[in-house]
Amino acid sequence: MADDLVNVQIDGTWHQFPKGTRMIEACRQAGVEVPHYCYHPKLSSPGNCRMCLVEMGMPPRPKPGEELARDEDGRLPIQWMPRPVIACANTVSENLGIRTESALTKSCREGVMELLLINHPLDCPICDQAGECRLQEFSVEHGTGGSRFREDKVKKPKNVDIGPRVRLDDERCIMCSRCIRFTAEVADDPVLGFTERGSHTTLAVHPGRRLENNYSLNTVDICPVGALTSTDFRFQMRVWFLKETESICTGCGRGCNTEVSSREGSILRQTPRENNEVNSTWMCDQGRLDFHYVNSEARLTQPLLKGSEGHRAVSWEIAVKTLADKLAGFESSKIAIIASARLTNEDLYLVRRLAQQLGVKELDVIARFGEDDGYLVAADRNPNSRGAVLVLGLDSDPGSRISGIRRDIESGKIAALLAIGEDLTSPEGGFSPALLSQLEFLGQIHHTANATADAAVVVLPGATSFEKSGSMVNVTGRLQRLAPVVPLPGEAREDWLILRDLLQALDGGNGAGSSDEVFTLLAHEVSAFEGRTLASISPLGEVLIETGETVPLLEREKGRIAKGEIVG
Amino acid sequence: MDFIALAISAVKIVGLVFLVIMPMVAYAVWAERRVSALIQDRVGPNRVGFQGLLQPVADGLKFILKEDFTPKNVRTGYYWLAPALTMVPALLTCAVLPFGSQLFGEPMVIANLNAGPLFIFAIASLSVYGIVLAGWASNSKYPFLGGVRSTSQMISYEISLGLSIIPVLMILGDLNLGRMVQDQSVNGWLMLPLWGDRFSLKGLLLLVPVVISFVVFTVSMFAETNRLPFDLPECETELVAGYHTEYSSMKFALFFLGEYAAMIIGSGLAVTLFFGGWSLPFGWLSWDGKADIPWWQGLIHMATFFGKVVVFILFFIWVRWSLPRFRFDQLMRLGWVFFFEIAVINIILTAGIMMLVK
Amino acid sequence: MSNVTYISGKEPHSREHRLIFRNIDRKGYDPGLKCYLKDGGYEQLKKAVTMEPKAITDEVKAAGLRGRGGAGFPTGLKWTFIPPTNTKPVYLICNADESEPGTFKDRYIMHQDPHQLLEGMAIACYAVGAKLAYIYVREEFPHAARILEEAIAEAKKAGFLGKGICGSTFDLELYVHRGAGAYICGEETGLIESLEGKRPYPRIKPPFFPAVLGLYMSPTIVNNVESLCHVKHILAMGGAEYAKLGTPNNTGTRILCVSGDVQKPGYFEVQVGKVTLGEVIQDFCGGLKPGRKLQAVIPGGSSAKVLRADERFKLKRGDEMVEIGLEDIPMDFDSLAACGSMAGSGGVIIIDDSRKISWVLNNINSFYAHESCGQCTPCREGSLWMKKISDRIVAGKASPDDVATLESVANNIEGKTICAFGEACSWPTQSFIRKFRAELVADTREELAGVPVNHETTLAAANLKN
Amino acid sequence: MALVVRRPQLKWWEKIYLPVIAKGLVITMRHFIRTLTGRTKVTMQYPEEKWNDQLPEHYRGAPALVTDEQDRERCVACQLCEFICPPRAITIIPEEIPSEDKWAKVEKRPLAFNIDMIRCIYCGLCEEVCPEQAIFLRKDYAITGESRAEMVHDKARLYEVGGRRVGLVNKWNDLK
């Protein structure tokens, strides 16, 4: 391995890097940030922004017969090249020198910054990118501060509708072509391109096409300026007010790592977080925008009890007590519990304990399947099916007992049903309101009002995945953490807390005090989780079980890294 | 006593207390604020009514409407009693003050006692109970300290106060305040004996002890009424608000009223003893108490009395906004080491003059 | 040679040495194959296919042929850059995107003597092992494209192209590709991108050296029309013999395209370095217009640095340095480079004292602002900025500060771009300002210093005064 | 080293204090008379009299929004003032300007712009930070209301107070 390492001098200090490392990455690893716009490790390097120009030097070519003198460390002298080179596309070689702070480098950066800014509208007060804009940042770090540009700026189209979720402002575009490369290389939907030339170069969608693939919002993430903005997040909030919480997406079994931005208790956007084992740096639009229901009007905020005049709000004590009493009043063989594979492992563990306590055999989750899109969206649309199988100890595929439960309700074999985190009347659930009305007792724990709740005697308001802490297992068997982003509305509670109280009401024992404690109990009982704690799960998750599944997008990315097209 | 006499007394009481003393208290407060403002180059309350003359009404309304709460750990009974105990003695003392000569044949005094000054001192010294009680019942350290200070201060200065007027009594030879005024009306005032009998060598010689007497009396009066520079029982820099820290609303107002009422009575006493009460100077419209006088003359006498009182009150205010507060030890020292001795010596001096000079 | 007669009025100058242009404006000559064969055409191809490819490359190397497109890179050396381990197909592209202002030689070859080019290309393809070659013709030459296509069809019919050329096993398919009209397509990687059907964005080097990763990521040789024609003549004369033409290291003949303020502008094929700039102006072009004085010369196409008429240059003659004037500069690659300019594409532009320097500079800047491809930042933004500043200088709305700004913008472009366009557009500005600063400053107005010029800032300034 | 404070050695007539007391009384009496006769200038009779005429150009009164000479809202809801505001008195909800609007090119404006005048400390940082010269501290300094809600100035109120401001940058000139 050591043979593959080369010695590189960066700003006077010698480092070792594997041969073939890009200079920009070498500098990054050495703790020196080289400013750049067009370069993105997951995309090809066209080297067109010219921001990463650095001074480079190599040992001089010896004249025939001449031997270059080495210093005491065995290094050859470095002859600095008069012209700067781009750090993003050039790779390091033995005895290479890089200067990122030299006068030449500085003048290059100043010059490029000035040129980038002359035709860029300085409408930062309006632009949504302000605060996370590379142009702003580098202008402060590397710019001159003043402008010598006294001419009129080039006018280009503004507020262009290029797709349902992305808006384009051409005047702000600095032609880094990241979005073009993303749509062509990663999303395989090359609809973006440049038209016109010179200063009038304009980003545009191909005539008759629109940027509407399911990964279009990633272009917004990678756009270093405010040219591409999300229609959904546009003008909602300045980014410096946002509080970022690291969590995972629960839209499907992939469990893409996310960063959820919120302000004062409401979620405003969700962006992907880099995890090269799960989602690279990308995320699908569908999952990304799937948070609006959290602020919905239909959220359940109080425990409800059905009386003769419909549901009325009651205290938690009464609601939990009623639910416990009702369930305890049935023979265990007449009770069924339908949990959800959208619940966390901790929730599911307490469901398992509840089933044990009540002696319930009819226990299952509702399965959801769609199509694997060949990128990130997994066929399994439940975020925690793997976890459900492991934690609930299901002996068959998740969802396979649901039709049996339906039949048993019809025949009257099952008289009481507790639905946790699922609307049974949903297409995937397949229970009709008429069928539910045949039950003697129906209880529900869910975060949003639904038809099942209408039929339920006891309705307990639970939490969405943005409001609870816990863990989930994705389709590739990776254990990942969920973090609470916003506080719960009204009196709603985290599901594990509701289930704990219910268990306590049934067995009178002491329950766990936090989801961490629930996880510890789970780790004692379920072998796959043994020796782990909730707090010890790395922010990027860790492999829990081997499922043999791969992520198509990551496989392609690995291929491109191997070919040297991208850095990865 | 027959019914008519009783009714007349009642009219006098009500008239004096509610038509004169109370409004005077109210306007003393207004004057206090206006004068202090003028002294300090400000304007003072001028917003409610013409020149702010309705300010006292607004203040009173405010006091009545304010929440009247009783702190949790006070001795409720005493706590409630204390304000009344400061208010009542102050008002009681006005019973013996001759606030006029005669009106429609009726002497303008509520109770024409033959031991007027003694009665006043006896009653006035009761007001210390209100303050002590307030300080103690509040169950709070600052009021308590204020109460303790007040007690020692008032007891101390009562001595010099009492002793200071003995020369006056010796000169006038009477304890009936009404007759003391009549005497001054005819023979010249004690402080300014510029006409009549007292305008003689003996009278002028006696002026020396009388002036000393007046100074000691006035200073002691300041101390007795807890006014600056002797307001140590309620000095806000040390004790928040002293004995009435825990009081609010009308109860606080009663302390306030009591203080100002005491000030008015004190002024009245000083006027009566040293400046001829209701009498005009130079024997104008003098009255020896024998024959009846026309009603207009009585009214002029009454106006004269209250005019003098007002001047005194203004003097009180003037002093308050001019002088800094004493330290407590200085206060006690002044009372015991100087005024007490001065008053005693003054008595001897008076006696000597009276004995030696014919 | 004596049997060659030219259209009257188009006779070559006595000091010309016509190789490539032998048939241009020749009386009775047409672009057809028959005419070409009559004149000894395709003989060299017939000879070449019997030779070892390496032998041809060696001949070209021995001839010391330098590329006539602009950079002057040795052609033979370029051919050897194809990796010996290469397994991918090799392509040869004829760069017929002649778009440098001041240059007009390739169009004559294509219009009047297309078979000469085809023969040269076929020999070159044989030498580098290419079985597929393209002629990239610029959009503005529709006739050339048509003539070349007809010629290819004729040659193919006659067996000079296609399968088994001249009875050998050498196969060659030749296609004409028409560009869409962009200066940047003359840049070899831009040309390759364009040929691939993309926007002609020049590629970054490294790693995209055409000889390694060229067209379709395969080794590709890109040569100028004139360079390829020379191959035929090198083979005919033999490399060593060819090298005797011209001066050492600047061998052969080259075509000078003289334009501008001379009596008789036109093309002249001369031995490289055998004539001086003064001779070109005085002898070949009949001198300046009456009563005019020479002001400046751009010796190698618009992107070459300008030379001032009264400038003095230091040149190496033998072993000693001599100081010479503009008139005495020999028209060869090395001498012009030593004088701080370049031989470029051979387009000599003569500027007399009737021209305002600011107007000349603005003209050049306008061209480059229009032609910048817009890929990389410095040239995209800088070229238009330079144009806008020089616009103002011409319009008399600039201040002396603007000249300094203009220079620093050019400095910010030079050497910082992906392709040579950065230099092409910054060199004229840099050299004009360096050599004609006084003239440029004379067109500016001192009182305009700091006065905003655009509409928005004017408005802002007006408000500021309120 | 302890510092010895030298106490003044008072004469006997100084010790009885009466002369100084009298002196003090004279001083206060002089003030009293001077004020009473109007020779001393007293406090302004607020609110009958106000400062408006005497206020300096840079006075920091109530913050308000201004429109430009074409009655466009200058504010583009950049929320910098909300960010900088030390007592967090400012709340802005941005919105997109509908495409049919005359000023659609500006793209963004405040849907709601509230300044809680109970919180406002008149520091002027909002004016300082505003990149659009949309918020200015006006001369209004008597901001009163009968309820807390009334003390929250909404957008309409802010424009009413601010009015129209002609000219672009009065902010950085010498006076302001």
Image (cartoon, helix red, strand yellow):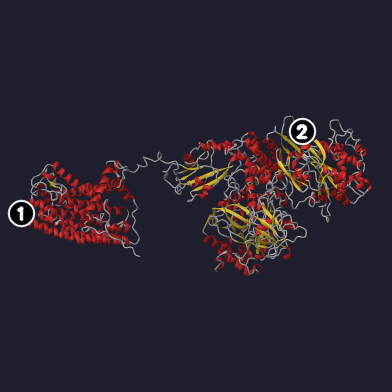
User: In the rendered view, would you say A438 is above or below A216?
Assistant: below
* Residue located farthest toward the top when viewing the structure as drawn: C290
Q: Nearer the viewer, residue A98 or A505?
A: A98
Q: Where is residue A102 drawn, in percent x and y? A: 63, 54
Distance (Cα) linking label 1 and label 2: 150 Å
Give me the disc on residue A427.
none
Residue A378 appears in the figure: no
Q: Is residue D160 left or right of residue B133?
A: right
Q: Position of residue B8 (x, y in %)?
A: 16, 48
Q: Is residue A340 visible?
A: yes
Q: Compare residues C372 and C405 and report the one nearer the observer.
A: C405
Chain identifier of the residue bearing label 2 in the image:
C
Q: Are marks 1 and 2 on the same chain?
A: no
Q: Nearer the viewer, mark 1 or mark 2?
A: 2
Which residue occupies the extreme left position in the image? B358
Which residue is painted at 47% across and 39% down in the image?
D160
Q: Say which quarter of the image contains residue A326.
A: bottom right
Number of labels in the image equals 2
- Which quadrant holds the N terminus of chain C? top right
Residue C365 lies, in percent from the top left, at: 69, 39
Disc 1 designates what residue? Answer: B358
Look at mark 2 in the image and give the residue it sits on: C287
Tell me, yes or no, whether the two marked residues, 1 and 2, touch with CB atoms within 8 Å: no
In the rendering, at what x and y percent does residue C259 appear?
Answer: 76, 35
Residue lying at 37% horizontally and 41% vertically, measured from the top left: D47
Toward the right, the furthest residue is C167
Q: Nearer the viewer, residue D124 or B31?
A: D124
- Helix, strand, or loop for circle 2? loop
Kind of residue indicated by mark 2: Gly
User: The residue under label 1 is which amino acid type?
Assistant: Lys
In the rendered view, tell whether residue A455 sits above or below residue C152.
below
User: Element at badge 1?
Assistant: loop
